[in-house]
Image (cartoon, rainbow, N blue to C red):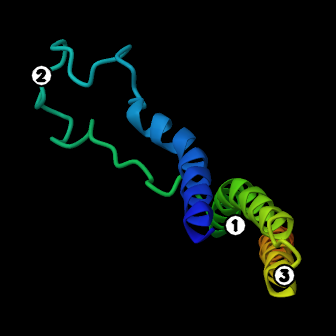
Amino acid sequence: MKSLTVFFLVMFCLLALAPGLVAAQNPPNSGSNPPNSGSNPPNSGSNPPNSGTALTNPLGASSFEDLLKNIVDWLITIATPIAVGMILIGAFQIIFAGGNPERFATGRKTILYTAIGYAIIVIGWGMVSIIRDVLNVQ
């Protein structure tokens, strides 16, 4: 039964990470404007040498509130399929308990702890909105 639990957990993790892996393979600038097409030489006089170089923000957030929102959104995106999988595993533990009260209780605890963990993550979403309201006070 433990190997079945590990199998389901690994499968749901792979399914949760698949969109991110596909998005990471696509380049952000798909060839419409090459960085140096030859029309302007690199040092044409008045421009400093690094004027065309720009650093991108790896976090994708311009403020602390945006960073918190991105983190919580990522957690919810990852936690939702894992929570569904763990609830299914808990249900299978209950179904296959075969009258054994300890195995039945294990299934109930699996479902309970999954619900509590997911509720904590969803509460984090509310905390982000509270932090936004506090930081935007003028």
Measured as percent of width and height from the top left, residue 133 is found at 86, 71
Seen from the viewer's position, the closer of residues 86 and 76 is: 86
In this rendering, the count of numbered labels is 3
**Residue beneath disc 1:** 65
- Give the amino acid type for the residue marked by disc 1 in the picture: Glu
Tell me the CA gap for discs 1 and 3.
Answer: 49 Å
Seen from the viewer's position, the closer of residues 106 and 112 is: 106
The C terminus: image quadrant: bottom right
Seen from the viewer's position, the closer of residues 69 and 107 is: 107
**Residue beneath disc 3:** 100
Measured as percent of width and height from the top left, residue 76 is found at 73, 59
Residue at 56 percent of width and 39 percent of height: 19
Q: Say if 122 sits above or below 104 in the image.
A: above
**Residue beneath disc 2:** 41
- Give the amino acid type for the residue marked by disc 2 in the picture: Pro
Q: Please tell me in which quadrant of the rendered image residue 5 appears.
A: bottom right
Tell me the SS state at disc 2.
Answer: loop
Comparing labels 2 and 1, the label whose residue is closer to the camera: 1
Comparing labels 2 and 3, the label whose residue is closer to the camera: 3
Q: How many other residues sit within 10 Å of disc 2, few (<14), some (14-19) or many (≥20)?
A: few
Measured as percent of width and height from the top left, residue 128 is found at 78, 70
Q: Is 7 positioned to the left or the right of 103 in the image? A: left
Residue at 73 percent of width and 64 percent of height: 86
Mark 2 or mark 3, earlier in chain:
2
